[in-house]
Amino acid sequence: MSDLPNIEKKVSQAVRHFWLTRNKQSRKQGAKSGARDAGARTAVTGGAQMDGFINLLTELIHGAGVGRSYIFHSAHLELPGYFRPTKEWDLLVVKDNQLIAAIEAKSQVGPSFGNNFNNRTEEAIGSAVDLWTAFREGGLHKGIAPWLGFIFLLEECPESLRPVKISEPHFKVFPEFKEASYARRYELLCKKLIRERHYSASAFLTSSRTRGTKGIYAEPAEDLRIASFVRQLISHVAAQAR
């Protein structure tokens, strides 16, 4: 836990890594194809953007006394599912055939927030439901219930911050969604994932393209701050994985 006082600096470095990696991937693809759309597509689908966060969590888990041989962040990330054979997570802690923790680190940038919001929501819920059902059915050897974490980084821009209209042709939506921006929708998603116990903890960050390359970010919700996420994670893995 010695690194926790410097968590803001380290998260800033992870945010900077996200934007610099994304920009590099976009330029590289564009140089190969000469197509701007292809470059944008690669920046969305290419890996490694969230590696700064995964590396940070890996070091904090190790610093809490968990051996590196129990921490998986670049390979062997598959876990059995109930509705599908396997699902690949972003970070796992596994010891003695016991899943200690599993973490997802996801992001979204513009300009297409609408369809991508629905996809990210379905992915987050589906991954958790699949894992917990597999756990219930003995696919993870039962034992201690694992700790599940969900980190989300959203591009801060006019499109993600402006209110979004909702179509209600048959039934009224829940009032918290009325005139909510995509940023607010993601915040609600993270809160509700915890409230419904799909995940043990969640962290929600926003960052703009220009300020993000300097490591500047915001945390819109006090109860979704990454420092709290880290404290809960470290407390669990330190107790279970030694």
Image (cartoon, rainbow, N blue to C red):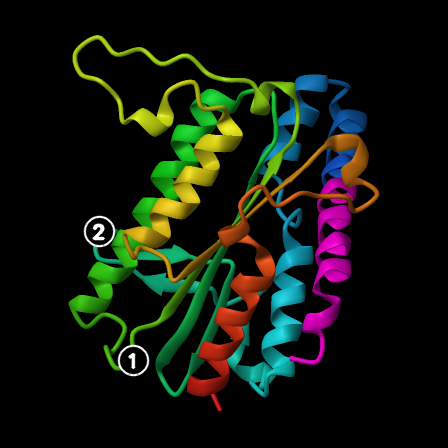
Q: Amino acid at mark 2?
A: Phe
Q: Position of residue 64 (x, y in %)?
A: 60, 83
Label 2 vs label 1: CA separation?
Answer: 22 Å
Which image quarter: residue 58? bottom right
Residue at 74% over, 61% down: 10
Q: Position of residue 161 (x, y in %)?
A: 58, 24
Crowd class of label 2 (few under 14; some 14 to 19; many from 20; radius 10 Å): some
The answer to whether 29 appears left or right of 151 in the picture is right
Crowd tier of the residue under label 1, counting other residues whose Cα lies within 10 Å: few below 14, some 14–19, many 20 or above: few
Identified at 21% across, 57% down, the residue is 82
Query: Which residue ends up furthest to the bottom in the rendered image?
Result: 242
Secondary structure under the numbered disc 1 in the rendered image: loop
Q: Tell me which numbered mark, 2 or 1, is placed earlier along the sequence.
A: 2
Q: Nearer the viewer, residue 7 or 18?
A: 7
Q: Amino acid at mark 1?
A: Ile
- Place of residue 114 in the rendered image (x, y in percent of width and height, measured from the top left): 46, 21
**176 or 85, nearer to the observer:** 176
Q: Quadrant of residue 154?
A: top right
Q: Nearer the viewer, mark 2 or mark 1?
A: 1
Q: Which residue is mark 2?
A: 83
Q: Which residues are magenta?
A: 1-21
Give the quadrant of the N terminus: bottom right
When the figure is inspected, residue 33 is found, relative to residue 62, above or below; the finding is above
Tell me the residue at 66%/34% (across/down): 43
Number of numbered discs overlaid on the protein picture: 2
Which numbered dot is residue 144? 1
